[in-house]
Image (cartoon, grey):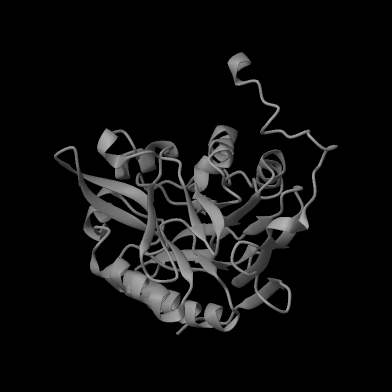
Amino acid sequence: MVPLHRLLSYTLPEPPAAGDGLRLALWQGSGTAATPEAVEENLQRLEALSARAAELHVQLLAFPELYLSGYIVTPELARQLAEPLDGPSLQRVAACARRHGLAIACPYPERAQVAGEERFYDAIALFGADGCLLRNYRKTHLWGPDERRCWTPGYLEPEEGPPFTVHSVNGVAVGLLNCYEAEFPELSRRLALEGARLILIPTAADSWAELSTGQRTSRPYPDVSRSLIPAHALHNHCFVAYANRCGIETVQGVEKAAYLGNSIVCGPHGDVLVAARPEATLLVADCLLDAYGLLHPEDTSYLNDRRPELY
């Protein structure tokens, strides 16, 4: 059962045609974490939300960081809950994308054999509307001691391929980053240079969280939703979307974290298309490529006018 949620929409009567833009939806909600039962609950919610998103003609539906397992994990729980990319949970997500004809970005804990070793990644699987995998992105910049205990940074090994790539959804080039990576301007710029017109950033930004030591974090996570997210959109002249949780996350009935609920979609001029309050919300926005003119006079562009030999 999907809990009641607010629908926050910035859309035209018809969704964008292929190549013209993308109708994007972000799920912001709360739930349980760190048990097989929580994974099943989160999968059922994803399936129900996908059906609702399809009714709204959404073309890409995205979820917060580590959506399948919940964010609160210890190294032991990370290893228990992590699944391979072709495991049963991601197969269900792929089937859901195919059934409803919409792309899905599903963050999850990944178990993989890399360079002859079993490794664990904070990953995002992006499936196309046909259910085929477009991208499996592994978080490259890990936040704090807890994440470094749980996960391996992505793309340490050549066999993983290039870290920053873009992939077509409804004819729009989409790039992925993950939570803390939103705070590195180099990463959004790197995706923009690859041609990204939408940078999608699942996150788990909290007001407090219990660490693996049993202590709570000493301060809220920085709210970058109204500062860095619009700035990245403006200086890269692309759409940027930040998908967070809200409310309390529990593990076997015990409160383990509270999230900021600051999900947002920004346009290429740094403008806000939709921004959630800290409550369960399905945010829907039409990201129209031709709706934005140049910021500066013709032949002036941040990307084209760079002088990287000086940096």
Q: Position of residue 14 (x, y in %)?
A: 69, 77
Which of the 4 image quarters holds residue 59? bottom right
Residue at the image point whose x is 68% and y is 72% from the top: 8
Q: Is residue 218 visible?
A: no
The residue at the far left in this view is 116
Q: Nearer the viewer, residue 306 or 124?
A: 306
Q: Is residue 117 left or right of residue 232?
A: left
Q: Is residue 168 visible?
A: yes
The correct choice, above or below, for 240 with respect to 192 in the image is below
Q: Nearer the viewer, residue 214 or 199?
A: 199
Residue at the image point whose x is 59% and y is 78% from the top: 57
Residue at the image point whose x is 62% and y is 14% from the top: 310
Tell me the quarter of the image containing the N terminus: bottom left
The residue at the far right in this view is 297
The correct choice, above or below, for 56 with respect to 200 in the image is below
Q: Nearer the viewer, residue 296 or 137?
A: 296
Q: Position of residue 189 (x, y in %)?
A: 59, 36
Q: Position of residue 272 (x, y in %)?
A: 74, 56
